[in-house]
Amino acid sequence: MEPLTFPASGNVRVQITVAVAEVRVREHADGVGLHITGEKEPDQVVVDSSVDPDGTLRVTVSERRRRSSAWKRRKGLTIVLDTPPQTTLVIDGAAVNLHSNGRLASVRFTSAAGDARLEDIAGDVDVKGAAGDINVGRVGGHLNVHLASGDISASSVSRGCNLRTASGDLSLGSLAGEGSISSLSGDVEIGSADSGSLSVHVVSGEVVVGIAPGVSTALDVSTLSGTTRSDLEVSSAPLTADSPQLELKVNTVSGDILIRSATRDTAA
């Protein structure tokens, strides 16, 4: 397919529904560019575009249905998307890998198998999959990830998280807002947790949580087979109404728990 371009003066929403693909997203200030390779038939890939009354450009990429046996013989598509930073990206596939450089408004990614690497998301990130690793830089909104198998990591999350994996490690550089994290088998590490509430449940794995400087913490920590340790200072000073507070609940069935003070570099 020849490269396509779409002018955009406002927000952009791109929806990609394909079976097997490598999707690469690059930040581009002027409009939307789309280059698709790997299609074997001229009518295999369908691209549509429209503009909403509010000026939002909508671009959709989809494939015509084929028999399931045909998908097994395909190598898949390569989709290169150049798009402005105010873009909402929605991807739905069977085996899709996503790699995004630059900033996006928000991302919803669903793939039975496939990895996602996202650099900078201004809003929410929503990921669902059976197998694959998810690596995100900055998340300005809420991070929601549900995996059957795979590691989850993010440099910073500004408005809470809901993370679930049956088998995989979870790592956050810094977290602000409400958080809920669970893993059947895997380690959990949070460099710096801010005020709000955070619940971490692990069946088999170690948990390390750093508490941001200046945050008062109420701890509820337990393990059936493991050790618990905290290096937080205990203070009897009364809390003021404007003191940042964190309610932290951590429990493991088999695994050590460490609660420590985060450094200011980690908290940043």
Image: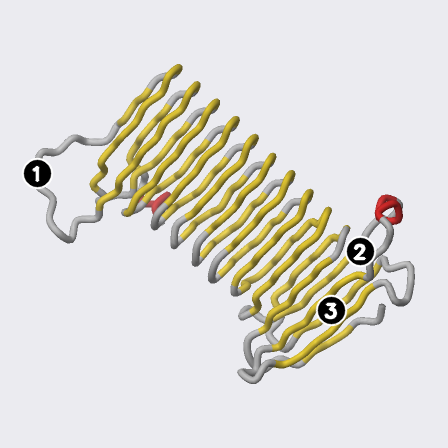
Find disc 2 in the rendering and name its residue: 77
Q: Residue furthest right?
A: 41
**Residue displayed at 52% across by 65% down:** 105
Give the position of the N terminus as an image quadrant.
Answer: bottom right
- Is 22 left, or right, of 208 in this rendering? right
Identify the amino acid type marked 3.
Answer: Leu
| Vertical comparison of 222 with 84: above or below | above
Find disc 3 in the rendering and name its residue: 34
Identify the amino acid type marked 1.
Answer: Ala
Q: Earlier in the sequence, mark 1 or mark 3?
A: 3
**Residue displayed at 28% across by 35% down:** 261
The secondary element bearing badge 3 is classed as: strand
Residue 104 sits in quarter: bottom right
Q: In the image shown, does 76 or 233 lie closer to the viewer?
A: 76
The secondary element bearing badge 1 is classed as: loop
Q: What label does residue 192 carry, if any?
A: none
| Vertical comparison of 54 with 237: above or below | below
